[in-house]
Image: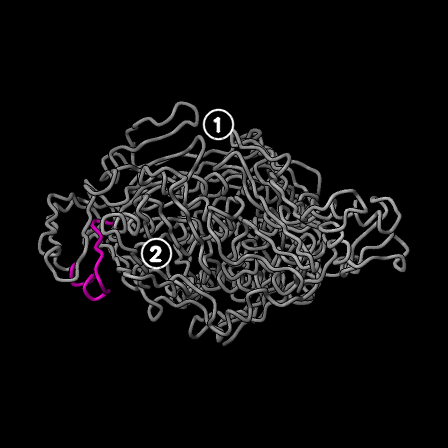
C-alpha cells in the first residue's frame, strides 16, 4: 500500500538533523542580544508560609543589579491553563500573600551577569510566618487540614469569573458516569478491588526552561522561549500580565525536548517584567535544580479501582476514584482528571462506569502536562487489575483482553467514538511476535 | 537466582482532546517558488520529535515534489506563523500535519488548472508525483512540476492570468465535541490510538533488580509518515516509562525535593535501554493526513503495568506502588516466602 506514495512512509532524514549534530541550531541559551541582562527568581524557603515582609533594598544597592521585582510590580492577576468552562485561576506570577511550595516565586532580579543575580538573590530578606503544611492529598481532603488556597477564581465559560472558597483543598472533581455500576456489579461473578499509588516524574528534557524578553520603545514585546505552544503561551501572558495580545510576539526557539513540560509558562512573565522595568533585554534560564523544584511534574496519583466481570470474562462494571496530588496550583490538573476518566471508560468495552477524579491541593511541587496526561498512572492500576481478573478466572490474560477489546465504529460508555481501532490486532500481533503461547507460564506456577 | 517472566498490558490514548478549548485548530501557508521548490509556514512545533520533517514529507507527497524540495520554517513568531494550538496531546502529525496537507492541496488545485491546459486534459484527471504532473495512467504524457509553476506565475497563455502560487489552510477536527460537565459524556477524542505491549523481564531474586530483556510494542499507528520518527517516539516512550517504573524516584521530605539532580534522580541512559521491538499495525485514520495518527505519547502508557505483570509471571509478586525499586522487590519476595512457608506448614 505504501508504494502508492513516493515520500510518505519513507525513512527520510530529519530536516534539521545536520544543524543539530553540528551544533548550528540556535537554542534559547544561544540567543544573545546587545545590552542583555540576566535574570533569576528568588524561591520560597518553606513549603507553606505567610509572607510578612520583603526587603529588597540591599539587593537593589548591589553594583550591577538593574531591577528587583516583587508582587507589587505585577498586576496581581491569577491565571490557569484551561480556556473554557472549568477554568480555574489560582497561580500568581510572583506570590503576594503566601508561599505554597518550596519552589514558589517570591521575587525576581535582573543584573549584568549571572553571578551578580545570584548574589542579589541572597541579599533579599523575606520575613515568613511558617504555616502548617500538608503533603498527602488524602490528608489534605480531610476537614481541618491546612488550607493551601483559601479561595480562587473559577470561570463557567459564560459569566466570567467568580471568586470561590476552596473546600477541603479540592480544586475540582471531574466525573465520568455511564450506565448503572451497581447493576453491573450485581451481574458480575467476580469483583476485584485495589488501591494503587503512582509517583511523580520530572520531564528531564535535556534543555531546561528559558526565555529572553525584549521590549521596544513602543512597548512591543518580543519573547523568545523554548516552548511547545507559542500561541498558548501568548494567551497565558495576556492573562498573567494584562498586556494586549497584539503587543506580544512569541518566538519559539529550537526546543531541546519537552515531553509536555514546555506547555507551561515558567520564566516568561518575569523576563518581560524585568525587561519592561530596565528597558534592556533579559535572559532567564532554569538550572537543573530549578527544573526539579519549580517546574511541573507528572501528577502523583492514588487510584482506587473496582472491577466486576462475568465468568466468561466480560467486563460488567468499572468504578474508579483518582486522587491527583496537584501540588500548590491547579495547572493541568483539571484536564488530567477528566482525561483519565474518559480513557478509563474507553480502553475496554464496558457499559457501566463510575469515575471520580479529585484534583487536590497540597504543599508539594505542582503537577502539569506530561506524556500520557494521567493515562500511565491510571493504566498502571487498571491493567494490573486486569491481570488479577484473568488470574481469578484462570484465564489467559491475552484472551481476557481480546474478549473485551472494542472494535472500530462503536462508541465507548462515555461517548468516545472508537474510530480507527486495531486493538485486537495489536494484542494478537504483540503476543504472536514474542511467542506468548510458549513463554507465558500460566497461573499455576505461582 | 535470575527468573524470567512475561506480561501484557494494553492502552488507548487520544490524538488531541477537545476540552480546554472548543477548537482543535491548526493552519498552514505553502508558497511555491518559480523553480518548483516549496516553502512552508506551519504552526507545528518541533521539539526534537521531527514535526517539521513530517510536515515536509506531507507537503512533498501532496504536491508531488521531492522531500528535498520542501523547506519548513524553523523559526518565526506568533506574528507571522499561522495559528496552531501547539505540539501536545499527540496532535502534531494528526492535526498540524493535516493542515499542511490541506494547504498543499490548495496550491496544487490552483496549479492543476494551468497544468491541465498544458496537458490538454481535465484537472480531475491529472496527478503529480516526483516533480512530474501527468495524466492518470499515462505517465508519458507529462509536464515538469517546475514548468507548470513557472507558467502559473509568468505565462498568461493558459488561463489568461499570471499569478504567484500559494496555498493556505485553516482546519478543525470534524465530529469532536466538548464533554458535558455533569457526566463527562461526549466525543472529546479527536482521534484515538490503541496498542498492546509485552514485556519480558528478568528478576534477580538476590538483589531485587528488575531488568527488561525486551519490550514489544504493537501500536495501531494509522498510516506511518516516517518509520524512523514512529520508532523513535515509541522507543523513547518505552524508555521513559521504564525509567518511571523502575529507576526514577523523586524523594520528598516535608515537600522539599531531596534529589534535584541527575546523580541522585536516575533517568535511564543508553546502558539501561532494553531492546524494543516496535510493531506498527497500520490502519487508516480518516481525519489524519494520508490516514496518519500521532504517536508522541501512547508508547509510554502501558509500560508500568506491563512490567508489573511480567514481574508477577517471573516471581509471583505484584506491586501496587511505583516505583518498583529493588528494595520493594526484595521485601515482597521475603513476604511471599514466609507466606508460602506458612501455607506449607498448614497443609
Q: Identify the magenta region.
A: A104-121
Is the residue B334 above or below the residue A351 in the image? below
Q: Quadrant of the C terminus of chain A?
A: bottom right
User: What coloring was used for the rendering?
Assistant: one colour
Instruction: Tell me the chain of label 2.
Output: A
Q: Mark 1 points at which residue?
A: B182
Check if mark 2's residue and mark 1's residue have beta carbons within 8 Å.
Answer: no
Q: In which quarter of the image is the N terminus of chain A?
A: bottom right
Side of A442 relative to A79 (left or right): right
> Alpha-carbon distance for marks 2 and 1?
42 Å
Is residue A111 highlighted in magenta? Answer: yes
Q: Which residue is drawn at 52% across and 44% down?
A: B83
Is residue B220 among what the camera can see? no
Residue B135: assigned label:
none
Q: Name the residue under label 2.
A: A212
Query: x, y percentage for residue B282?
Result: 71, 55
Amino acid at each position: 500500500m505504501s508504494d502508492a506514495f513516493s515520500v510518505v512512509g519513507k525513512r527520510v532524514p530529519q530536516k534539521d538533523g545536520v544543524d543539530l549534530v553540528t551544533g548550528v541550531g540556535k537554542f534559547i541559551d544561544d540567543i544573545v542580544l546587545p545590552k542583555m541582562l540576566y535574570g533569576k527568581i528568588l524561591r520560597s524557603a518553606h513549603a507553606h508560609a505567610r509572607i510578612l515582609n520583603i526587603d529588597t533594598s540591599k539587593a537593589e544597592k548591589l553594583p550591577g543589579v538593574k531591577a528587583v521585582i516583587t508582587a507589587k510590580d505585577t498586576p496581581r492577576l491569577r491565571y490557569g491553563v484551561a480556556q473554557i468552562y472549568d477554568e480555574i485561576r489560582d497561580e500568581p506570577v510572583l506570590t503576594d500573600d503566601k508561599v505554597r511550595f518550596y519552589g514558589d516565586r517570591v521575587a525576581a532580579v535582573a543584573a549584568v551577569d549571572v553571578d551578580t543575580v545570584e548574589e542579589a538573590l541572597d541579599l533579599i530578606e523575606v520575613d515568613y510566618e511558617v504555616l502548617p503544611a500538608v503533603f498527602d492529598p488524602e490528608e489534605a481532603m480531610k476537614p481541618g487540614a491546612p488550607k493551601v488556597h483559601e479561595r480562587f477564581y473559577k470561570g463557567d465559560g459564560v459569566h466570567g469569573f467568580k471568586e470561590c472558597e476552596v473546600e477541603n483543598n479540592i480544586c475540582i472533581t471531574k466525573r465520568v458516569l455511564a450506565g448503572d455500576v451497581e447493576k453491573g456489579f450485581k451481574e458480575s461473578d467476580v469483583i476485584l478491588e485495589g488501591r494503587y499509588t503512582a509517583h511523580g516524574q520530572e520531564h528531564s528534557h535535556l534543555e531546561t526552561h528559558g526565555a529572553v524578553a525584549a521590549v521596544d520603545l513602543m512597548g512591543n514585546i518580543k519573547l523568545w522561549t523554548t516552548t511547545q505552544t507559542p500561541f498558548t503561551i501568548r494567551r497565558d501572558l495576556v492573562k498573567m500580565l494584562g498586556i494586549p495580545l497584539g503587543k506580544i510576539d512569541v518566538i519559539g526557539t529550537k526546543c531541546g525536548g519537552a515531553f509536555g513540560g514546555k506547555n507551561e509558562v515558567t520564566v516568561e512573565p518575569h523576563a518581560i517584567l524585568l525587561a519592561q522595568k530596565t528597558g534592556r533585554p533579559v535572559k532567564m534560564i532554569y538550572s537543573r535544580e530549578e527544573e526539579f523544584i519549580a517546574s511541573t511534574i507528572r501528577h502523583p496519583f492514588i487510584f482506587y479501582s473496582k472491577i466486576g466481570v462475568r465468568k466468561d470474562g466480560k467486563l460488567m462494571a468499572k468504578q474508579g476514584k483518582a486522587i491527583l496530588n496537584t501540588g500548590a496550583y491547579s495547572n493541568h490538573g483539571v484536564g488530567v482528571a477528566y482525561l483519565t476518566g474518559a480513557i478509563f471508560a474507553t480502553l475496554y468495552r464496558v457499559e457501566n462506569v463510575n469515575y471520580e477524579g479529585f484534583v487536590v491541593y497540597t504543599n508539594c511541587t505542582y503537577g502539569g502536562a506530561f506524556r500520557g496526561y494521567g493515562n500511565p498512572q491510571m493504566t498502571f492500576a487498571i491493567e494490573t487489575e486486569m491481570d488479577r481478573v484473568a488470574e481469578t478466572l484462570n484465564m489467559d490474560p491475552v484472551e481476557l483482553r481480546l474478549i473485551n477489546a472494542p472494535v472500530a465504529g462503536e462508541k465507548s460508555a462515555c461517548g468516545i467514538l472508537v474510530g480507527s481501532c486495531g486493538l485486537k490486532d495489536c494484542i494478537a500481533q504483540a503476543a504472536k511476535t514474542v511467542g506468548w503461547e510458549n513463554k507465558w507460564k500460566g497461573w499455576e506456577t505461582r | 537466582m535470575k527468573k524470567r517472566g512475561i506480561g501484557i498490558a494494553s492502552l488507548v490514548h487520544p490524538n488531541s482532546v477537545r476540552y480546554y478549548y472548543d477548537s482543535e485548530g491548526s493552519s498552514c501557508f505553502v508558497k511555491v517558488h518559480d523553480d518548483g521548490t516549496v516553502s512552508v509556514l506551519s504552526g507545528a512545533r518541533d521539539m526534537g520529535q521531527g514535526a517539521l520533517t513530517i510536515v515536509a514529507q506531507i507537503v512533498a507527497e501532496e504536491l508531488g515534489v521531492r522531500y528535498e524540495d520542501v523547506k519548513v520554517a524553523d523559526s518565526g513568531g506568533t506574528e507571522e506563523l499561522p495559528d496552531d494550538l501547539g505540539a501536545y496531546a499527540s496532535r502534531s502529525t494528526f492535526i498540524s500535519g493535516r493542515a499542511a496537507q490541506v494547504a498543499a492541496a490548495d496550491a496544487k488545485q490552483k496549479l492543476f488548472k494551468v497544468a491541465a491546459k498544458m496537458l490538454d486534459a481535465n484537472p480531475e484527471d491529472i496527478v503529480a508525483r516526483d516533480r512530474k504532473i501527468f495524466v492518470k495512467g499515462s505517465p508519458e504524457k507529462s509536464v515538469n512540476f517546475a514548468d507548470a509553476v513557472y507558467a502559473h506565475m509568468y505565462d498568461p497563455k493558459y488561463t489568461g492570468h499570471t499569478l504567484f502560487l500559494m496555498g493556505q489552510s485553516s482546519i478543525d477536527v470534524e465530529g469532536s465535541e466538548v464533554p458535558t460537565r455533569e457526566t463527562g459524556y461526549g466525543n472529546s477524542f479527536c482521534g484515538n490510538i490503541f496498542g498492546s505491549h509485552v514485556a519480558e523481564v528478568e528478576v534477580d531474586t538476590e538483589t531485587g533488580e528488575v531488568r527488561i530483556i525486551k519490550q514489544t510494542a504493537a501500536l495501531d499507528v494509522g498510516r506511518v509518515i516516517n518509520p524512523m520518527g514512529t520508532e523513535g517516539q515509541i522507543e523513547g516512550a518505552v524508555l521513559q516509562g521504564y525509567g518511571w517504573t523502575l529507576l526514577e524516584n523523586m524523594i520528598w521530605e516535608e515537600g522539599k525535593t531531596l534529589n534535584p539532580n541527575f546523580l541522585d534522580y536516575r533517568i535511564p541512559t543508553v546502558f539501561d535501554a532494553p531492546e524494543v521491538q516496535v510493531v506498527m499495525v497500520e490502519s487508516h485514520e480518516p481525519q489524519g493526513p494520508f490516514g496518519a495518527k500521532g504517536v508522541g505519547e501512547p508508547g509510554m502508557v502501558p509500560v508500568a503495568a506491563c512490567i508489573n505483570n511480567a514481574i508477577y509471571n517471573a516471581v509471583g509478586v505484584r506491586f501496587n506502588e511505583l516505583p518498583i525499586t529493588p528494595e520493594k522487590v526484595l521485601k515482597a519476595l521475603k513476604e511471599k516466602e514466609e507466606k508460602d512457608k506458612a501455607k506449607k506448614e498448614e497443609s
